[in-house]
Amino acid sequence: MTTDKTITEDDVSRMAALSRLSISSEERTLFARQFQDILGYMDVLAHSDTDGVEPLYSPSEHAQTGREDCALRLSTRDATLANAPQQDGTYFVVPCIVQAG
Amino acid sequence: MTDICSLSLTAVANALQKKEISALETTQACLNRIEATEPKIAAMLLVNNENALQRARSLDAAGPDPALPLWGVPVTVKDALSTKGIVTTAASRILEGYTPFFDAFAVEKLHKAGAVLLGKTNLDEFAMGSTTENSAYQTTRNPRDTTKTPGGSSGGSAASVTAGQCFASLGSDTGGSIRQPAALCGCVGIKPTYGRVSRYGLIAYGSSLDQIGPLARTVEDCACVLRVIAGHDPRDATSALLSVEDYAAGLDKNALKGVRLGMPKEFFNNEGLSAEVRLACEDALKTARNLGVELVEVRLPHTEAAIATYYIIAMAEASSNLARFDGIRYGKRANSTKDLAELYECSRSEGFGQEVKRRIMLGTYVLSAGYYDAYYRKAAQVRRLLRDEYLTALAACDALCAPVSPITAWQLGSHTTDPLRMYLMDAFTLSLNLAGLPGLSLPVGLGKESNMPVGMQLIGNAFDEARLIALAHALEQNLPDVGRPAL
């Protein structure tokens, strides 16, 4: 565990960038303190001996059932586009991704 | 029929089938109750008056059908479940106005069983919270004392059921979000086994933890709804291919004789457990013992690590699940952004509330290079230890019993500034989600000091809901009623 790590405001900025979030300077200060507390609390896990323990990622032990691998039409184009903030009747519209050379 | 809204779901469903009351009359009574109580409790994010009345009229025109167990029964649904043609927000600004073109599996099942959907209930944004105070729209109040929290995240559902606005509500439980509000409001809530109810159409928070379940005023009512919504669904790969039992059939008030109930020492000896909650649980267990229950002490030694384990896993899964909210296909989009990256960042920052941001960022952190093994993998290993401990404890008895919330409903606003303190309140509920096991929260009395309801949970082996329901029903018949709120 990273028991003695201090969470700085720079750490918080990096976490925000990785999360595709922008945060205010007040939030940065607040989160640094709160994350320090929360991650500090997580260190309780260090007391658990997990040598050789296989991680458990899902609790389901019952057989997982896949469905037939075939395309299904679950909605129409209109229904799918209906919630888009911007669309042209055929496609979702987004800002320019690649700048012209 | 004097007050339709005070009936149990079972009683109203019978009266509807016998045409003693009409679906329209029942729906109108609930809508009137909503109108009278909403200014005090704010349980509903959306009330669907016209659709509900229209649905009731068409049911009446077709006439009752004994094959439809919820024929004409008005229900509400947590706003984390998708409803076709009805705005679904998960109490987040980022989904303001979002209207799904499909129903969640559990909602589809309610419709097919003849239920009337009255509207959508409030929750903490994306189900992240224990009070509904993290809702971007409103804070729900406890119908028994409107200065106090109804709990959360399914606080709107618990308040709606308790206030008599509906006969049952669907909630979702990722770390206690059905059981804890049921306990704080004084109604019954079931978190089924992971895989018992399809998660299709539930807006995902922690996908390996989330489970949909019913809240209602009696155990039998919850059993009736669980039977309707359970079952296999090919659209959720974790949905179990098991037949559904008639959970409400053969309920017997003598079902406790000869039953062994395990009391986890780490829960009952927990220093955070308030005296009044402990006392109410002990009184209920005294009653159980008089009815033939044998109480045995069991151990869950990794309980101390459960909160950290849970929050690491839940936040990691949340950070991944909530990556889909990008302002492109649905939901909020920020204005005047210069490129795609800025559009993502601004849309998400404007759309998410502070607790959601906190969990996404911490989840991203515990999954990031250099920290993954120390946090996420370690938590997944402890998760196995916790699950194995539950299974060992359950091998020695028929079910476990435990408090739900360490304290009764608290004052609104009293815990909002310290997220860690709030996380610690989930100590008795969240390990069940890590283990994927079923739990039922039953009101067992009123706290001596607060005079607010105390909930006790019964915990069983995977897919053992029928036994939990049978035991809880028998206990319920022998415990004093916690009464109705005076609203």
Image (tube, coloured by chain):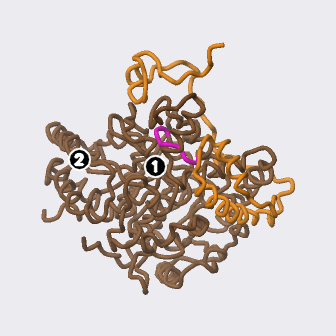
**Residue drawn at x 21%, y 49% as measured from the top left:** B17
Magenta stretch: helix, strand or loop mostly:
loop
Residue wearing tag 1? B245
The numbered disc on residue B72 is 2
Q: Residues within 10 Å of mark 2 (few under 14, many from 20)?
A: many
Left-right relation of B329 to B264: left
User: Percent position (x, y) of residue B98?
Assistant: 39, 37
The numbered disc on residue B229 is none
Tell me if residue B252 comes above or below residue B278 in the rendering: above
Task: Supply the letter of whichever chain is brown.
Answer: B
Q: Residues within 10 Å of mark 1 (few under 14, many from 20)?
A: some
Q: Work out whether mark 2 precedes mark 1 in sequence or the reverse, and give the earlier one.
A: 2
| Label 2 secondary element | loop
Report if residue B399 is visible in the image: no
Q: Residue furthest top?
A: A101
First to last magenta residue range:
B200-206
Task: Supply the letter of whichever chain is orange.
Answer: A
User: Percent position (x, y) of residue B273?
Assistant: 57, 78
User: Percent position (x, y) of residue B439?
Assistant: 53, 61
Does residue B205 belong to the magenta stretch? yes
**Residue drawn at x 80%, y 54% as measured from the top left:** B374
Name the chain under label 1.
B
Of circles 2 and 1, which is in front?
2
